[in-house]
Image: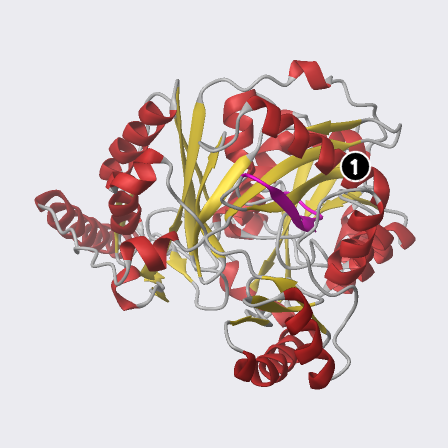
Amino acid sequence: MFKKILVANRGEIAVRVMRACKEMGIKAVAVYSEVDRTALHVRIADEAYCVGPPPSSESYLQGDKIIDIAKDCGAEAIHPGYGFLAENPTFSRNVANAGLVFIGPSGGVIEHLGDKMSARKTMMNSGVPVVPGSEGGIEDEKQAVRLVNEIGLPVLIKAAAGGGGKGMRIVHAENEIKSAVRGAASEAQSAFGDGRVYIEKYLEQPRHIEIQILCDTHGNYLYFPERECSIQRRHQKVIEESPSPLVDPEMRRKMGEAAVAAAKASGYVNAGTVEFLVDKHKKFYFLEVNTRLQVEHPVTEMITGYDLVKEQIKIALGAELSIRQEDIVPKGNAIECRIYAEDPRNNFMPSVGKLISYEEPAGPGVRVDSGVYEGFTIPIFYDPMVSKLIAWGMDRQEAIDRMLRALSEYRIVGVETTIGFHKTVLQEANFRDGNISTHYIQEVLGDISVELEVTEDDMIAVASAVSYRRMKQDAQLTIGTAPSGSSGSAWKNSFRPARR
């Protein structure tokens, strides 16, 4: 067993990984930027080291610095979480070259599957269904026009590297092709340093359904029940659930077997996710492989009872999977809402700032994965996710009702959040009936108007928080206690500076 693991991330995923480490008797090491010095993942870590200034390019993306810290503090492995360096093949290779264990797939696998064109070719060769499209990158605009005429409109122009909706254009008319190719290539070059693009048939009103896989070094492969991730805004998931209301047992088996075929074809090891698009005829097509733990992994854990982070660590140790495919039997339904510090009434613009009052929901079947606390300031430098709220029920109806109850209990004062937006979705008839697609927000909700909910409890919470802080400051001045954040703070002095 590892004695010490460095978690190369921040926020709720860093907290999530550290808690799994502690339950396994492993010491957890945090890295933090200067603005994250008081972050929750730093507070709960056994050791914490500053890795640089606030911008992620100068801190959480400094792979060489993070590896140096891991070696200096005696960590044996690095868990990347998701985002930042999690899908960086160079970082994975450098971790291994430094004599440490990267908790994830090898650099070669990450590189191969991170290139959507090479991944697409691999899937075609292994029999995994793919969306009709070009076999390689687009060399020029004339070729793009010819291919679009062969494939048929509408089509997607997509970046070969990266994701998150960047470098992607939908083309509905022939006169849009050339400008779409130029725009997608330019955006891809800016975002990923790789301007290659390719063409896929655009599936109208598809569903986004994915399969979690686990693969060990002994040739064992597992798939878990699917996750429905169709509720998206700007190609980013905001609500996920498992199982999907669309998928029946036979379709689940076929998708699972296709995901395993994809993993075998690429030599995959550790946890990953094979994503599919599903058309209105329930035909599924390979989309991509995410070579890391997914944000939405808790819904899979809630319906199966397995801890995916612990399984990742065991696989990284070289252990053989102790789970058999027949052991994975879903029980009930789980839904996850990503709670962002964003304003849904203002095109989901970030709303960062101090959490004046913060109270998480609880009760049967409710889980909150968060990286914040009352008084913490959500910085402007990173993704504005506050937490992931997960609700489980014996069936989908109970899971939805339980989530609505949990959302109504969630108290966040100081920033705008997406709590009201989630309530609106969960009460909407099409969602409750399972009639959804990746265009649900635009086509069903349209220009959604989310009411600002300011209750009497909220106003009391704000007044109480302000009054409490004033009383605390007065008490500190009276008895001479060092104010929080000064050199007199005992827990602050427990941090060890990164050695060089």
Using residue 422 as the reference point, say whether residue 488 is left or right of it: right
**Residue 293 placed where, x, y %?**
64, 43
Residue displayed at 83% across by 43% down: 126
Where 10 sits versus 343, above or below? above
- Judge by depth and name the residue closer to the eye, 500 or 40: 40
Quadrant in the picture for residue 448: bottom left
Where 28 sits versus 374, above or below? above
Residue range (magenta):
282-293
The answer to whether one can see residue 353 in this image is: yes
* Three-letter residue code for mark 1: Ala
Quadrant in which the C terminus appears: bottom right
Using residue 348 as the reference point, say whether residue 27 is left or right of it: right
Whether 285 is among the magenta residues is: yes
Quadrant in the picture for residue 450: bottom left
Local crowd at mark 1 within 10 Å, few (<14), some, or many (≥20)? Answer: some
**Residue 287 placed where, x, y %?**
65, 51
